[in-house]
Image (cartoon, rainbow, N blue to C red):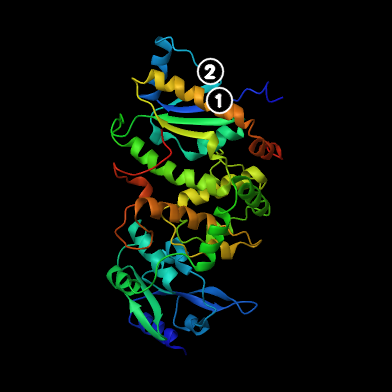
């Protein structure tokens, strides 16, 4: 059973750094595991914590959130604001028992195509090891329209 | 007539306050909120050890604001809420007069400076019982915590009493009531409940004055206040500022420092 399990990952990436970085991974012909669905948003500042919960609700087993390195934000400070939000959200997820091993935050710049490939591979392997996020998915199946 | 009542009457007669918010006798020996609009209304006002409810949530209500200058009776939690509401520009400095009991004698605090001075003597932070509650949860494993919260939140019926009583929940339209898009399911099933409480805690992180009113208001006894208190603790620990500490604080999550330290972003 666990051998046939392939995790479904959702990646929220910012338009200016990580999306371009993932693009570079492709143009550099670097291969990485295909479990990830990339969602492009304007800036990490746009990534509301509810987006992450919605990803879990819709069947993700793991989530990657990535954007510009500090000091590199296209909008000057979006990633700084996002970082504060994640610092609290990371704590809160853990406090409520949401599996924080399934949510990976990262900075990947437009020049770090190799880092993106390594990140996706690493997260995919980890989540494959953890198995499907049954606890959360079971909950969403109970009486949800 | 008790001393607080007497003081409230003086404030009203002097025109300093048109409305006085305080406590009146409720059912089962509890107290209910009293919004006195005249000196005669003040007859019902009670001031004793049972008056523990933080009434600051009423300060942002439209009907109260429209009535004119307000005086409000309360304790430390009310004062902290007052400071936070001024910091969030929901009330102006001097618009609200606080009436507190200092060792049994009524004391009038008519400005933010007076409130801050009064609070300087008070310890800040959660009651020990809540500190212990959070510590007990933190000592559990992730799976245990998940199961614990699932069981607790399973009793939630989304009555929103925690939101309604919260002095910091004053948005005219709450995210929970928005249905285009419907971010959080309205039904009180496990998913809807979990998401609601995550949203509430996140929206109060860096803003919660840790009065614990939400937990007291819960009709089924879920310790929902632990969530907001924890979120506030997290923000306070990481960003070095506490809601309700000063009327000049920026909201912790809409500001930043380039050297904010975290350990989990790669």
Residue B37: image location, x then y, percent:
45, 75
Which disc, if any, is residue A103? Answer: none
Residue depicted at 36% across the width and 81% down the height = B107
The disc numbered 1 marks a residue on which chain?
A
Residue A105: image location, x then y, percent:
45, 34
Q: The N terminus of chain A lies in which quarter of the figure?
A: top right
Name the residue tied to disc 2: A33
Mark 2 neighbour density, 10 Å: few (under 14) some (14–19) many (20 or more): few
Residue depicted at 71% across the width and 40% down the height = A142
Residue A70: image location, x then y, percent:
31, 34
- Looking at the rendered structure, whether the residues under marks 1 and 2 are on a common chain is answered as yes
Disc nearer the start of the sequence (1/2):
2
Residue A130: image location, x then y, percent:
61, 32
Instruction: Decide: is A79 above or below B56.
Output: above
Q: Tell me if residue B241 can be seen.
A: yes
Mark 1 neighbour density, 10 Å: few (under 14) some (14–19) many (20 or more): some
Q: Give the quarter of the image for residue A73.
A: top left
Left or right side of A75 for B223: right
Residue depicted at 47% across the width and 82% down the height = B42
The disc numbered 2 marks a residue on which chain?
A
Name the residue tied to disc 1: A125
Residue depicted at 48% across the width and 13% down the height = A31
Instruction: Decide: is B89 above or below A13.
Output: below
Q: The C terminus of chain A lies in which quarter of the figure?
A: top right
Instruction: Decide: is A112 above or below B11.
Output: above
Discs 1, 2 touching: Cβ within 8 Å = yes
**Residue toward you, B99 or A120:** A120
């Amino acid at each position: 059973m666990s051998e046939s399990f392939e995790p479904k990952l959702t990646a929220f990436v910012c338009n200016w750094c990580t999306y371009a970085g993932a693009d570079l991974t492709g143009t550099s012909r670097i291969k990485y595991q295909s479990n990830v669905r990339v969602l492009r948003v304007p800036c990490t500042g746009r990534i509301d914590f509810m987006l992450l919960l919605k990803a879990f609700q819709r069947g993700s087993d793991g989530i990657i959130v990535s954007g510009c390195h500090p000091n590199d934000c296209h909008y000057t400070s979006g990633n700084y604001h996002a970082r504060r939000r994640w610092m609290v959200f990371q704590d809160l997820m853990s406090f409520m028992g949401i599996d924080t091993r399934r949510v990976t935050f990262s900075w990947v710049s437009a020049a770090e195509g190799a880092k993106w490939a390594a990140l996706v591979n690493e997260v995919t392997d980890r989540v494959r090891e953890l198995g499907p996020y049954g606890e959360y998915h079971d909950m969403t199946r109970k009486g949800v329209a | 007539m008790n001393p607080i009542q007497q003081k409230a009457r003086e404030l009203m007669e002097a025109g300093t306050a048109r409305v006085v918010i305080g406590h009146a006798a409720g059912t089962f020996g509890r107290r209910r909120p009293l919004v006195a609009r005249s000196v005669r209304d003040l007859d019902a006002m009670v001031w004793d050890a049972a008056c523990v409810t933080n009434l600051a949530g009423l300060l942002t209500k439209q009907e109260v604001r429209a009535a004119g200058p307000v005086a409000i009776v309360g304790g430390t939690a009310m004062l902290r809420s007052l400071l936070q509401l001024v910091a969030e520009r929901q009330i102006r400095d001097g618009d609200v007069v606080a009436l507190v009991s200092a060792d049994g004698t009524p004391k009038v605090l008519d400005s933010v400076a007076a409130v801050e001075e009064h609070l300087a003597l008070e310890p800040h932070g959660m009651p020990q019982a809540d500190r212990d509650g959070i510590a007990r949860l933190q000592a559990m494993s992730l799976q245990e915590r998940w199961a614990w919260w699932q069981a607790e939140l399973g009793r939630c019926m989304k009555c929103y009493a925690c939101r309604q009583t919260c002095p910091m929940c004053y948005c005219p339209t709450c995210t929970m009531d928005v249905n285009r898009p419907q971010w959080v399911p309205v039904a009180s099933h496990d998913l809807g409940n979990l998401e609601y409480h995550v949203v509430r805690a996140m929206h109060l992180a860096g803003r919660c004055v840790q009065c614990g009113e939400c937990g007291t208001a819960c009709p089924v006894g879920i310790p929902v206040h632990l969530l907001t208190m924890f979120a506030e603790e997290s923000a306070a620990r990481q960003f070095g500022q506490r809601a309700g500490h000063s009327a000049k604080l920026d909201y912790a999550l809409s500001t930043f420092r380039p050297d904010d330290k975290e350990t989990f972003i790669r």
